[in-house]
Image (spheres, grey):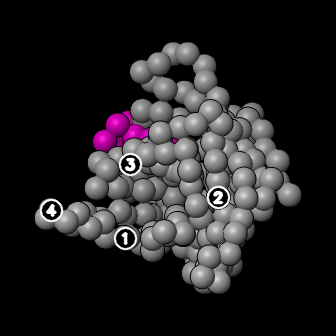
């Protein structure tokens, strides 16, 4: 899922009723106004795993994918968690670390969750392309600290983050449930679009 990250990557996404296009529409407010840490919504421990059913609008067949924290290691004093998918996806590896300020990819300064998480918060990362124009990878907290229903499950405290990645020309939204992790990924048909292309919905999880 390189183009469709969230991933967790599965690099995964807003999820869900994401923009407020109607005149006078008011974005949701945090029902829990206290600060939220990324690690609250994406627990990283070896053995944690999440299974999703994949709804691809271009492919009616039923597919599933499981992401798990396969191992961890210390690199330059930082604990890195290696996530893997089964079956393997296009971007079947994801290496994340918990650092001061949130959860980021271990090989870049790209934060997938940035502390504290509040509705309306935004951050971005510049993607450098040698010889080409710099592109932005922009994130926005669509909602934070609110209940959500995903599939047949209801969660008391969820945060949804939307990403518009100009370098990869892909947009996605990931909904995280506190204490569980990513529970839904939505990949859109184009940048700044709300038209859904592929949706991953959690069906089971195991958190240690």
Which is more N-terminal, label 3 or label 2? 2
Image position, residue 191 (x, y; %): 30, 48
User: Mark 4 against mark 3, which lies toward the viewer?
Assistant: 4
Q: Residue at x 58, y 30 (%)?
A: 54
CB under 8 Å between callouts 2 and 4? no
Does the magenta run of residues contain 67? no
Separation (CA) of disc 4 from disc 1: 16 Å
Residue numbers of the magenta segment = 186-195
User: Mark 1 against mark 2, which lies toward the viewer?
Assistant: 2
* Camera-nearest residue between 119 and 39: 39
Q: Is residue 134 left or right of residue 171?
A: left
Instruction: Determine crowd level at label 3: few under 14, some 14-19, many 20+ residues with C-alpha closer than 10 A.
Output: many
User: Mark 1 against mark 3, which lies toward the viewer?
Assistant: 1
For disc 4, the marked residue is 132
Position of residue 3 relative to residue 119, above or below, is above
CB under 8 Å between callouts 2 and 3? no
Separation (CA) of disc 2 from disc 4: 31 Å
Q: Residue at x 67, y 44 (%)?
A: 67
Separation (CA) of disc 1 from disc 3: 14 Å
For disc 2, the marked residue is 82
For disc 3, the marked residue is 171
Which is more N-terminal, label 3 or label 4? 4
Instruction: Determine crowd level at label 1: few under 14, some 14-19, many 20+ residues with C-alpha closer than 10 A.
Output: some
Q: Secondary structure at mark 4?
A: loop
Q: Secondary structure at mark 3?
A: strand
Q: Secondary structure at mark 1?
A: strand
């Amino acid at each position: 899922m390189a183009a469709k990250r969230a991933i967790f990557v599965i690099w995964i996404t807003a999820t869900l009723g994401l923009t407020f296009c109607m005149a006078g529409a008011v974005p949701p407010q945090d029902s829990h106004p206290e600060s939220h840490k990324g690690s609250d919504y994406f627990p990283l421990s070896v053995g944690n795993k999440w299974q999703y059913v994949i709804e691809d609008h271009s492919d009616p067949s039923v597919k599933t994918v499981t992401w798990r924290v396969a191992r961890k290691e210390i690199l330059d004093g930082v604990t890195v968690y290696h996530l893997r998918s089964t079956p393997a996806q296009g971007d079947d590896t994801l290496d994340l670390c918990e650092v001061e300020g949130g959860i980021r990819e271990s090989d870049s300064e790209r934060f997938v969750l940035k502390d504290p998480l509040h509705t309306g918060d935004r951050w971005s990362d510049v993607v450098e392309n040698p010889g080409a124009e710099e592109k932005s990878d922009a994130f926005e907290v669509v909602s934070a600290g609110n209940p959500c229903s995903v599939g047949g499950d209801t969660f008391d405290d969820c945060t949804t983050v939307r990403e518009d990645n100009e370098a990869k020309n892909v947009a996605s939204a990931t909904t995280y449930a506190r204490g569980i992790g990513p529970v839904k990924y939505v990949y859109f048909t184009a940048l700044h679009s709300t038209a859904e292309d592929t949706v991953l919905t959690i069906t089971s999880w195991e958190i240690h």
